[in-house]
Image (cartoon, helix red, strand yellow):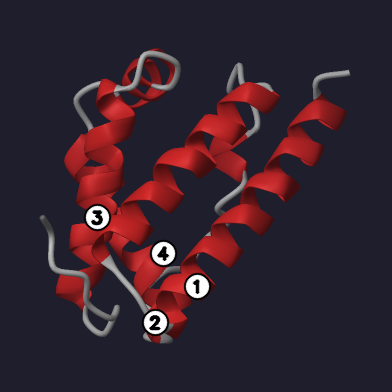
C-alpha cells in the first residue's frame, strides 16, 4: 500500500502526474485518444503537466500558455471527462492527503467541466 503524503514539492507533482498518466495510457476508454494524439511525445507532455500542476498547486509559476487550446479538436464526450476525473481522483486519493490534494481534485473537476462545456459548444 502506498503511503499517502501531502503535496509539497515538484517530486510530489511528478508522482501525481506520472501515476495518473500511466493509468490514462492503459485505460480502455482514454488511451486511444491520448496515445493517438500524443504518440511518442509523452516526455514532452509529462514535462508540461509537471509545470502546469506545479504552478497550480505549489504556486511556482513555471507554466505559461493556454491549457484549453490543445484539447479543442479532441473527439471527447461526457463519458471521457467522467473517466478522466475518476482516474485523477483515484490517483490523488491513493497517494496524497491534505489541502493541496483537495485543491488538485477541485481544480481538475472545474477544468474538466469547463473543457467539456467549451468542446461541446465548439463541436455544434
Separation of marks 3 and 4 at Cα, in angstroms: 9 Å
Question: Does the residue at mark 1 contact the one at mark 2 (Cβ under 8 Å)?
Answer: yes
Q: Are marks 2 and 3 in contact (CB under 8 Å)?
A: no
Residue 102 spot, x, y in % from top left: 50, 73
> Regarding mark 4 in the picture, which secondary structure is present there?
helix
The residue carrying pointer 3 sits among few (fewer than 14), some (14 to 19) or many (20 or more) residues within 10 Å by Cα, namely some
> Is disc 2 surrounded by few (<14), some (14 to 19) or many (20+) residues within 10 Å?
few
| Image quadrant containing the C terminus | top right
Residue drawn at the location 26% of the way across and 67% of the way down? 13
Q: Is residue 124 visible?
A: yes
Q: CA distance from mark 1 to mark 2?
A: 7 Å
Residue indicated by mark 2: 98
Q: Residue furthest front?
A: 1
Instruction: Mark 1 or mark 3: name the one nearer the start of the chain.
Output: 3
Q: CA distance from mark 1 to mark 4?
A: 17 Å
Depth check: give the residue in front, 123 or 19: 19
Quick check: 87 left or right of 14? right
Residue at numbered disc 4: 52
Q: Which residue is mark 1?
A: 102
Residue 47 numbered tag: 3
Judged by depth in the image, the label closer to the viewer, 2 or 3, is: 2
The image's mark for residue 69 is: none
Distance, label 2 to label 3, CA atoms, is 24 Å
- Which type of secondary structure does the marked residue at label 3 adopt? helix
Amino acid at each position: 500500500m502506498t503511503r499517502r503524503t501531502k503535496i509539497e514539492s515538484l517530486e510530489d507533482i511528478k508522482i501525481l502526474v506520472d501515476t495518473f498518466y500511466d493509468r490514462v495510457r492503459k485505460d480502455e476508454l482514454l488511451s486511444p485518444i491520448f496515445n493517438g494524439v500524443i504518440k511518442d511525445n509523452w516526455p514532452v507532455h509529462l514535462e508540461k503537466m509537471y509545470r502546469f500542476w506545479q504552478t497550480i498547486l505549489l504556486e511556482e509559476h513555471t507554466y505559461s500558455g493556454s491549457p484549453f487550446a490543445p484539447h479543442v479538436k479532441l473527439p471527447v464526450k461526457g463519458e471521457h471527462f467522467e473517466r478522466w476525473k475518476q482516474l485523477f481522483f483515484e490517483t490523488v486519493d491513493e497517494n496524497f492527503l491534505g489541502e493541496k490534494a483537495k485543491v488538485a481534485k477541485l481544480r481538475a473537476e472545474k477544468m474538466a467541466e469547463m473543457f467539456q462545456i467549451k468542446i461541446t459548444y465548439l463541436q455544434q
